[in-house]
Amino acid sequence: MVWTGVAGTRLHIAAARPVHHRSMLLKPAAHGACIRYAVPPWRRWMSKRDSSKSSFVSKVPQFPTWEPVAENQLPPRTKISPDLVDKLERLALVDFGNQEGVNCLEEAIRFADQLHVVNTDGVEPMDSVLENRALQLRNDEVKESDCVSELLQLAADRVEEYFVSPPGNIPLPKREERLAMLKHSAF
Amino acid sequence: MAASSSGNRILLHKLNELITFKRICNITQHDIFIRRIRTSRSKCQLQPKMHTKSPPQMVGVVGLEIHAQIHAASKLFSSSGVRFSAPPNSLVACFDASLPGTLPVLNRRCVEASVMTGLALNCTINRKSLFDRKHYFYADMPAGYQITQQRLPIAVNGSLTYSYLGGRKRNQVVTKNVRIKQIQLEQDSGKSLHDDHRNQTLIDLNRAGVGLMEVVMEADMECGEEAAAAVRELQLILQTLGTCYGNMAEGQLRVDANVSVHRPGEPLGVRTEVKNINSARYVAKAIDYEIQRQMEVLDTGGTILNETRAFDSKSGATVPMRDKEGLQDYRFMPEPNLPPLFVYESVASVPAGVDPTQVVVIDRLKAILPELPGVKRAQLVEEYGLLPEHSFTLVNEVGLMDYFERVIQKTKAEPRKVIGWVIKELLGNLNQNGLRLTQSPISSEALAELLNILESGHISTSAAKVVFQEMWKLPEKSVKQLVAELDLELISDQEQILQICRRVVDAHPEEVRVIRAGNKKVLNKLMGIVQKETKGRTDPLQVRRILEEMTS
């Protein structure tokens, strides 16, 4: 996998991905917060490339390479405190549910920690692969408007022509309640 | 519950909700609807130090964030229509409701409007600007984020010159300058109607996705009056440009004020944010109240909390709003669905392969920039010899300058004379009756005719004022008709005037004695009596001459 920076600098992220971490990603099974692939994404991508072999010679390496990153190269492990869980849940309106969810989050952060090893000095961050394209503009014309009936049909609840939502945000459990919840949730 | 309730009941219920809500919160219906979208700004904040030895007077420090709805037919990123008070959810495209798979397509008009506004505010227009997602959860923003311009906005580093009538008599034009930090394009949110009794919120997405320009003004202002004047000037500029209607009552212009107090030379104090002020008058009131409140808190040894407050127009006070207390984290990230926005200096700089008619070209917009209020005022002073404060009134009142110029074109009267009639008589009467200029019963033509009759010497100034009041009451009658009917034409018969003067002099021997003894001021009293007797139908200069002769 290659990221092409603005100045044409390439970062071989794959090189920073150790083998053992691949299995780590797959390990915390049966949890919704982690995205799991039967085949890791890079491999799916690779097989696609394999099947479309042509005369075109891509500058993208044909096979990913990597070397393990030693634990001592990484920053200290991030521990997620109950307060932080609380804050994240409020911000993202997600529910970690139990200790397993929190562990999964810590593992995900650990995985991402490897990016710290990559030297990005002098490389401008890339927002999008379209960053050198100009944005298309449209004329100021009203073309689609009256989808009210269609849209309202999709609503779970409505009053007249209004969508109905719960009042504000649903309050999350307080910190003490959360601690109790985490304590009682076992693997 | 929707299915089981009858429409009438719901409507009635909603009305009750609104009324109770309004009563409780002392806010207008408008406030209920408007939820604010803004970008957080961080500033080094320190509590002002308390000195024991005669400290210098504390002063207010005011910065503004103003959201202006862009005047466009369609929304910022979707092609659904934009209209105030349309039936709920009748102006909603799939993108506005954030249906999966929908993508933003930027409206060129919105970009042009922001570039024009940037040019009018002396900004640097960024040739390349970026869009970002600002995340927060609110039912009237279904995507869970607002698309805004946090990192690289469309326009930066501008300035706005504004004036207001200051001084002890409020007749001196005070001119100040405020720096414009940036103008950013962003989406408006929908509107929420809270129904606390039923524990639900009704959502109208008509406003969701409407294009906004957020104009960020630096904390260069010191009081409510300055801030209100800056808002008014910005409103005039936007209206002149046609980039925003600027109707504050309809939420087309919404003001947040960042207020702190400190002693000059010391670090800035902790600031509070007063949100969602929806009239220029309230801008002044809310800010002055907040400055006063903060000074009092500090004077009594208290500390200012960095909090969001709302202005209660009924009590004239600001009250704390329930806040998320430090939990706010907008998790800004680059908007992945929008490549950078490029605008071009000139048609020549548009790259090959790009249709110049489909892009935004700064030179093209510069060429169609209308004359701005500041320039108009200077012209009025220059061209007609008006006082600056008069030029101020003419430009600030919608349509008044055009009215004035139409009168000028049709009359021989001096502009300095005309301005008095337009501001004192016309505007005075309009304000007294709570009317707008478009509702004036006296047209510019009619006023010009009256002034022409006055100029020709047929009626006196005082008589003309009487005629003006009659014109106000009877707009269907012609000016000449009224003058004739009221019997106000100046007495041209020299003999008749002499007779009247003689009668007055004879009837007031005491006054005549005083005048002869050297007190010429008493002559004015006699003149007044003559004017009264003739219902103002004499030329004052002529009467004075005659009376002077008779009393000498």
Image (cartoon, grey):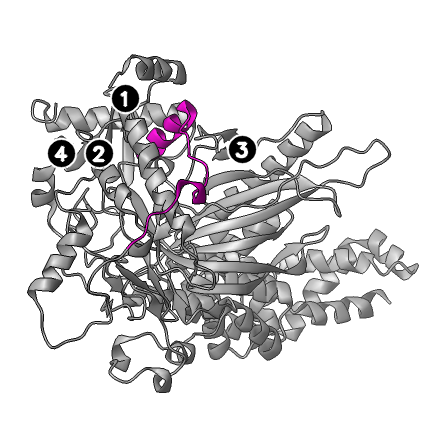
Pointer 4: what residue? A160
- Real-space CA distance between mark 3 and mark 1, rounded to the nearest whole angstrom: 49 Å
Look at mark 3 in the image and give the residue it sits on.
B316
* Residue corresponding to mark 1: A98
Q: CA distance from mark 4 to mark 3?
A: 36 Å
Residue type beneath disc 3: Gly
Residue A27 tag number: 2
Q: Secondary structure at mark 2?
A: loop
Mark 4 or 2, closer to the camera: 2
- Would you identify the image quadrant in which residue B306 lies? top right
Closest to the observer, A114 or A127: A114
Q: Secondary structure at mark 1?
A: loop
SS label for mark 4: loop
Q: Is residue B250 left or right of residue B502?
A: left
Give amino acid for label 2.
Lys
Name the front one of labels 2 and 1. 2
Q: Can marks 1 and 4 be said to lie on one chain?
A: yes
What's drawn in magenta, residue-wise? A66-93
Which of the 4 quarters of the picture holds residue A26?
A: top left
Specify the subunit that label 4 lies on: A
Lateral position of residue B472 relative to residue B336, left or right: right
Q: Are marks 3 and 1 on the same chain?
A: no
Label 3, secondary structure: give it.
loop
- Disc 2 versus disc 1: distance between alpha carbons? 17 Å
